[in-house]
Image (tube, rainbow, N blue to C red):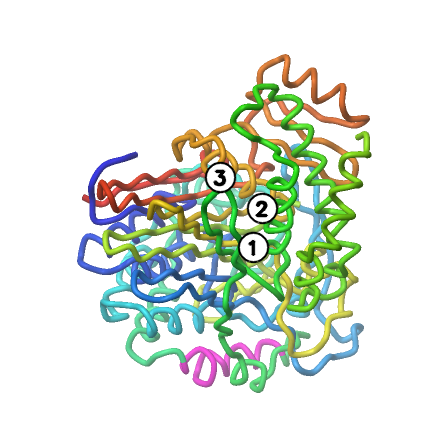
Amino acid sequence: MTGPAKGAVAAGDRTTAAAAAEILQDGGNAFDAAVAAMFTASVSEPVLCSLAAGGFLLARPAAGTPVLYDFFGQTPRTPRPVDELDFLPVEADFGTVQQEFHIGLGSVATPGLVAGAFAAHGDHGRLPMRRVIEPAVRAARGGVAVAPLQAQILDAVAPIFRWSEATRALFDSRTRPGQTLQAGEILRMPGLALVLEALAAEGVDLFYRGDLADRMVALNIDGGGLLRHDDLAGYRVERRQPLERSFAGATVFTNTAPSSGGPLIAFALELVAAARAGRPSDDDEAARLAQLARIMAQSNQARRDAGLMDECSDPVVARLLSAPFMADYLAAMTDRATKVGGTTHISVIDADGNAAALSVSNGEGCGHVLPGTDIMLNNMLGEEDTNPLGFFRWRPDSRVTSMMAPSIVERGDGRLLALGSGGSNRIRSAILQVLLHVLVHDRALSAAVQAPRIHFERGLLNIEHGFAAATVDGLTAAFERSEVWPDRNFFFGGVHAASHDPATAGFAAAGDPRRGGSALIVA
């Protein structure tokens, strides 16, 4: 979608995107709109977002410097013997693959979403919070028709969302007993509507020091969880300087330590630039993509060699992106032959040039709803992706690491791009490929998002449907192990992106169809 307007929105669901558009239409800015969409996603995208979730907002004020709001999950301060914890495996069925997750109150990290929303809105918001939160209240009380993708995700994680009497009351189908809500059925969350209204009236302390905190702690103490009052009262939103890199005449801002997704994207961009991969004059698509796959392989190896698997800190990121470290991978690349994530993303840009890229995750949920609130607690301590060293080996009172990489690009001519993706380990490869399509090939945003993708991991090259037959033949010949997918698939991430050209006052937005994407231009 293109044209002059008040702003552009891209998100993972039509109701989520509509909430942001409503706030822009009412005079709110990009940050108001992003917060409104995030609260609404807790109803419209119930597996992916919750008030007990965490995430990252990369804010680029029109006047000022970009800032990264880190409100991801925090590990509890006081460990508890593992045999006392409510912590158990369940298997989710995604059709093409089954994946084991761990749920129970022992899997819950200290949630940051509410703190992050209030921090970002307090710093940059224009409308009062009670107006920003209205679309979410309306959705929770009046109900939302479950979108086809959300119904599919609910079905995949049905063992979690049918775990307890409280979850079944919320998420069971009204027409198909024993199953989760079907596409088109109405999800109502009246308890959440009351909570949202109370938050708008009383502020963030309600969640971290007030009645909601008391309920969370009581549930954890009685039910085998780890959260205590000092975990909640001590939670802090971290305002960080985003990682900044120059690429193809643009400045790319992305997530930084202690999260690893952004640094690995920056590492890959450096390899692309140095190796001249994907240059416009290279019309051999198979050769170009093979080189890109080798760059993905080098990024995976660098994650291990730089120590990102053990710790993602500023010194580790500096080492990863240092010239001597990178030189080894450039040399190796020239010589070498060669989970479905519970994450959603929102991108918003307004006519003033404010840009917001916001990624959030509730894991898959822990199977327990906070009594009286309809809030599904997260299972961040029960995901292998966020616990690469093994469960319960985390350092107390520290941020959980993440692959989420909300990003904003400032091009040399003033054009802005906000983007991000869900997709676990595919987040970085999805964002990387969209960046290359836009910045190197100068493709329109919708074409860049919809273009077929590859993903290389653990020695296997995944090739999405949509490439020319000759390209597929060249790729499968170049790699010992490859898999050609028969469709455009959820597996390859979901990049939701918005852009603005101040010279023409034109906007574009693209929601990724792989993950139910919705894009709106606000007239």
- Number of marks in picture: 3
Amino acid at pointer 3: Arg
Q: Residues within 10 Å of mark 1 (few under 14, many from 20)?
A: many
Query: Which residue is at a point 47% across and 30% down the rendered structure image?
Result: 441
Q: Position of residue 374 (x, y in %)?
A: 45, 64
Q: Secondary structure at mark 2?
A: helix
Q: CA distance from mark 3 to mark 2?
A: 12 Å
Residue underneath mark 2? 427
Q: Position of residue 364 (x, y in %)?
A: 59, 54
> In front: 481, or 263?
263
> In front: 245, or 177?
245
Magenta segment:
205-220
Among numbered discs 3 and 2, the one appearing first in the sequence: 2
Residue underneath mark 1? 404
- Which quadrant would the C terminus be assigned to in this image? top left
Q: Main secondary structure of the magenta part?
A: helix
User: Magenta stretch: residue 304 in it?
Assistant: no
Among numbered discs 2 and 1, the one appearing first in the sequence: 1
Toward which corner of the image does residue 207 lie, by quadrant?
Answer: bottom left
Residue underneath mark 3? 515
Amino acid at pointer 2: Ile
Query: Which residue is at a point 63% across and 81% down the rendered structure image?
Result: 221
Q: CA distance from mark 2 to mark 1?
A: 7 Å
Q: Are marks 2 and 1 in contact (CB under 8 Å)?
A: yes
Q: Are marks 3 and 2 in contact (CB under 8 Å)?
A: no
Q: Position of residue 270 (x, y in %)?
A: 62, 47
User: Magenta stretch: residue 214 in it?
Assistant: yes
Q: Position of residue 216 (x, y in %)?
A: 53, 77
Amino acid at pointer 1: Met
Q: CA distance from mark 1 to mark 3?
A: 16 Å
Query: Which residue is at a point 66% across and 18% down the rendered structure image?
Result: 472
